[in-house]
């Protein structure tokens, strides 16, 4: 899926399911995409709808948080963002979002490329569903993260 089309899907699904806007609604798609990718002060990630979902979007804040370059993170199985003992909890969130459309208030332990463990807090996750009702994956956003002790 082309990048602008993916950003449109992220923004429109969020607005439709969560009832809020991730970017000001009067911005053009080009403005929104550039800001969301490069300047947003919060993390946004998305994975596809495959059996072993892979990241298809990660903005600069998320890349910094996870310590991956864009080309390393895109295509990475999203399950690898959590260590094996924490994956069951992550899978429960994904299943809940799949049936409810979105969930918010999630907190989970994640792992960066370097092995640094960190908490993501007050996460909102939602389904990426186009206007025809086709599910393309899921996305998540969070504004707070901190290193685990």
Image: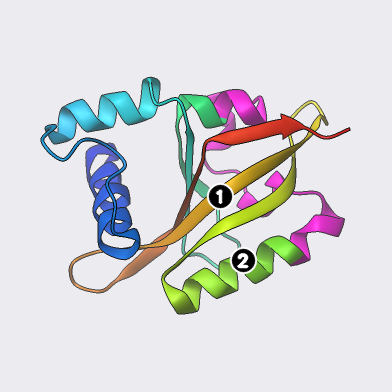
Q: How is the image coloured?
A: rainbow
Identify residue for label 1.
123
| Predominant secondary structure, magenta span | helix
Of callouts 1 and 2, the N-terminal one? 2
Between 88 and 68, the one lying in front of the other is 88
Is residue 71 among the parts visible in the rendering?
no
Q: Position of residue 122 (x, y in %)?
A: 58, 48
Looking at the rendering, the stretch of residues picked out in magenta corresponds to 63-88
Q: Position of residue 78 (x, y in %)?
A: 62, 50
Q: Position of residue 83 (x, y in %)?
A: 81, 49
> What kind of element bears circle 1?
strand
Q: Is 101 placed left or right of 71 in the picture?
A: left
Q: Are marks 1 and 2 in contact (CB under 8 Å)?
A: yes
Is residue 72 among the parts visible in the rendering?
yes
> What kind of element bears circle 2?
helix
Q: Is 92 placed left or right of 45 in the picture?
A: right
Residue at figure coordinates x 68%, y 61% from the top left: 90
Cα separation, mark 1 vs mark 2, equals 10 Å
Magenta stretch contains residue 90: no
Q: Is 57 placed left or right of 2 in the picture?
A: right
Determine which quarter of the picture holds residue 95. Answer: bottom right
Q: Residues within 10 Å of mark 2 (few under 14, many from 20)?
A: some
Identify residue for label 2.
93
Checking the image for residue 111, the label placed there is: none
Residue at figure coordinates x 65%, y 31% from the top left: 66
């Amino acid at each position: 899926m082309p990048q602008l089309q993916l950003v449109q899907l992220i923004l429109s699904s969020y607005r439709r399911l969560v009832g809020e806007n991730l970017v000001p609604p009067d911005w053009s798609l080009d403005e929104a995409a550039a800001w969301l990718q490069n300047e947003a002060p919060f993390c946004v990630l998305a994975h596809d709808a495959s059996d072993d979902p892979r990241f298809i979007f990660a903005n600069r804040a998320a890349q910094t948080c996870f310590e991956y370059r864009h080309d390393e993170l895109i295509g990475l199985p999203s399950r690898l963002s959590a260590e094996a003992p924490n994956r069951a909890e992550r899978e429960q969130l994904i299943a809940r979002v799949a049936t409810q459309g979105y969930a918010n208030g999630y907190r989970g332990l994640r792992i960066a490329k370097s092995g640094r463990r960190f908490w993501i807090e007050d996460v909102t996750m939602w389904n990426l569903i186009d206007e025809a009702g086709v599910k393309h994956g899921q996305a998540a956003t969070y504004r707070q993260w901190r290193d685990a002790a």
